[in-house]
Amino acid sequence: MGEAKKRALKRAENEKLIKPISAARFHLLSIGVRMAVSRLLSGEVSFWSDHDEKILGLISRDYTDQDFAWMILARDRIGRFRCCRVDASIKSEPLATEIMLREMAKLVRDGIPADFGWQGDEPNAPFDLLRVTEGVKLHPYFEIVMNSPGHMPARAALKEIGPWLAPSDPHFVREFQTTAFDQRIWELYLWAAFRELGFDVTQPEAPDFSCRAPGIAFTVEATAVSPSTAGPLANHPDPETPEEQADFLKHYMPMKFGSSLTSKLNKTNAAGEPYWDRPDTKGKPFIIAIADFHKPADLESLGSMTYSQSALWPYLYGKRVVFESKGDGGGYWRMVKGDEHIYGGKTIPTGFFDLPGAENVSAVLFSNAGTLPKFNRMGLRAGFVPEDHMYFRQGYRYDPAPDAYVGIPFQEDVLSPEYEEYWSDELQVFHNPNASNPISPDTFGGITQYYFEDGELYSITPVSAVIASFTAVLRVVEDEEWESQA
């Protein structure tokens, strides 16, 4: 038997123990492992695991030398996939793959040691988002995460993300499970999105995130729009007509956004320092990340986050768009100074970026996707699919037509092989034209951004950007079960 045939047979034997996996699955399982600088040095080629997913394999290509490397990852003492073996400067992808498969298969045949992935730098205890202390009253949404078979994909995503977190707030897990589910899942989403965008992320005491990549450093404080329990905004409008909806977006929602943003703008620590003057932030661009959770969805209506975002940019920039008719049936849109926002006897000025002190805020980041359905869809993309369930996403995508004022409707089967989605898809960055420490739009590749240039508002928007969506989760049942519940 020739040498080439022997090697082919050996590789075939190894491939019985090692399988290729999708990029989406590898990236979720290893979500915190890749350093920002490595993204500049090499590109990922293929992804592998044993059948029990105790070890992962990666083939990468060096951008400079155009040769290949392989890496084997295993879980460390607290459950994070970490690099355990690596070799580089291999002349071809097939050879690198052959060597890696041989090493992975040998580990499986010999029995993977329990401490194979241990690194020696792990904290004493894992950060477990899903471990519940007995006797606590759980948040209804967290109970859904834990008990609903249809939310198994979200549980899988949270299981992988949790051990990578190291927030300074010791109450994070308890609040996620009990009183502050929305705020905490928003922060979990931001962490995953920043990692996907290529940043190394740490979590200082305040603000919530410090993000770094070669030549880039900025900090982020997360906040959420919550229901008002007192004052004029506690009387929540229930708009039904187009005119009522327009009034809601023109007055009520800017006040809600403004309340959350200005509280962060004016907040100081015990030393009297605002966020941008603290040791972890001073000298770096500072961003406030905001999401709207003030009115959740129910069986009769969508949550406010699906439609409230159009109120944010007019409030931030103090501008609004009006249509000027030319008298011949045509016309054009132009931007004018916005009006004050008035509701329930309360009045606030428009233009958050014009407020005193707001020049210290480099940008405001927004997303309406930092929610449980996002974690479900990302878990599904990684192949964590419960039996007898279907998932359909419906909403609106960005319409690039210059005269468009609504998005392009879409409906997609999340389980379709053609379906694609990423953590950062729905992020929007509103750059502050008055920022004393601006952040370059080049910092955030591939997401929607807004900025002013020569007094005009410009946007960078990916063609497939989702404006708003909701996800329907359906469980398939047998006729007998259907009839018993009818």
Image (spheres, rainbow, N blue to C red):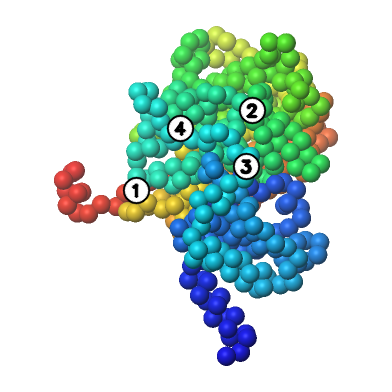
Q: In what element is the residue under mark 3?
A: loop
Tell me residue 399's x, y (percent): 61, 48
Mark 1 and mark 2: Cα distance apart in space: 36 Å
Three-letter amino acid code of the residue under disc 4: Gly
Question: In this orientation, which residue lies closer to the viewer: 195 or 252?
Answer: 195
Labels 1 & 2 near each other (Cβ < 8 A) = no
Q: In what element is the residue under mark 4?
A: loop
Task: Give the mark, 4 or 2, whose residue is nearer the N terminus.
Answer: 2
Mark 4 and mark 2: Cα distance apart in space: 25 Å
Task: Give the mark, 4 or 3, whose residue is nearer the N terminus.
Answer: 3
Figure check: 348 above or below 149: above
Mark whose residue sits in front, 1 or 2: 2
Q: Name the image quarter holding the N terminus.
A: bottom right
Task: Give the mark, 1 or 3, whose residue is nearer the N terminus.
Answer: 3
Mark whose residue sits in front, 2 or 3: 3
Residue 303: mark in rendering = 4
Question: In this orientation, which residue lies closer to the viewer: 127 or 275?
Answer: 127
Mark 1 and mark 3: Cα distance apart in space: 44 Å
Three-letter amino acid code of the residue under disc 2: Asp
Tell me residue 347's x, y (percent): 61, 12
Quickly name the residue at label 2.
208
Three-letter amino acid code of the residue under disc 1: Leu
Mark 2 and mark 3: Cα distance apart in space: 27 Å
Quickly name the residue at label 3.
120
Tell me residue 96's x, y (percent): 67, 69
Question: In percent of the image, x 46 and y 19: which residue is there?
Answer: 236
Question: In percent of the image, x 67 and y 73: which residue is there?
Answer: 95
Task: Give the mark, 2 or 3, whose residue is nearer the N terminus.
Answer: 3
Quickly name the residue at label 1.
474
Q: Is residue 80 left or right of residue 67?
A: left
Q: In what element is the residue under mark 1?
A: strand
Question: In percent of the image, x 49 and y 16: which residue is there?
Answer: 228
